[in-house]
Image: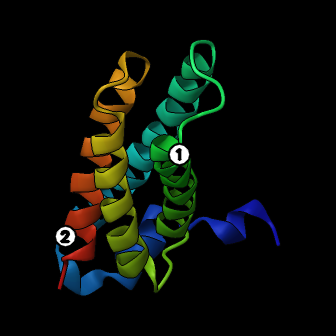
Amino acid sequence: MTAQALVMSPSEIRERYAGEGQGRIVDEVHETARRCLACAGSAWLGLAALLDRVAPIPDRLIVIIDCAEICEVTARSLMRGSTEMRRICALSAAICGRAAEAAQSERELADFVTAARQCERSCRAISERE
């Protein structure tokens, strides 16, 4: 399978979601995918910095790894126009929220908390779309 087969073009997304509003869904899908990737990236960077101070990572922070991984999956599902994207986004929103709460007290994860909250809001908006 080629990379192009895994990612829908904006025109393909518009065609698939033609009844959902003049390109708005395309912008929302791409922005949500971008936020998911930003969240995953900041999770991995924050965890790497945290490992300099705390090793192994405490169990309460394992949800941050879950968040990074589900965000990567979510971004890919959004970009290929998966029929399951609403359900995947709902799961991602829930995990991002839990991870942001768990990371709140770690200074190395401050950027992650911001990214996770943004991702949570975007994913929730996609998941609640009619």
Alpha-carbon span between mark 1 and mark 2: 45 Å
Nearest the eye: 83 or 117:
117
Q: Position of residue 85 (x, y in %)?
A: 42, 76
Quadrant for the N terminus in the image = bottom right
Q: Quadrant of residue 20?
A: bottom left
Residue at 58% from the left image edge and 33% from the top image edge: 44
Q: Secondary structure at mark 1?
A: helix
The amino acid at mark 1 is Asp
Rendering colour mode: rainbow
The spot of residue 52 in percent (x, y) is: 63, 13
Residue 75: image location, x then y, percent = 50, 57
Q: Residue at x 53, y 54 (%)?
A: 66
Q: Is residue 1 visible?
A: yes
**Residue 67 rendering spot, x and y as whole percentages:** 47, 52
The one of 127 and 104 positioned closer to us in this rendering: 104
Image quarter of residue 107: top left
Residue 33 appears left or right of 55: left
Q: Is residue 72 above or below residue 26?
A: above
Q: Is residue 67 above or below residue 55?
A: below
Asked whether residue 23 is in view, the answer is no
- List the residue tagged with mark 1: 59
Q: Residues within 10 Å of mark 2 (few under 14, many from 20)?
A: few
For disc 2, the marked residue is 22
Q: Which mark is residue 46?
A: none
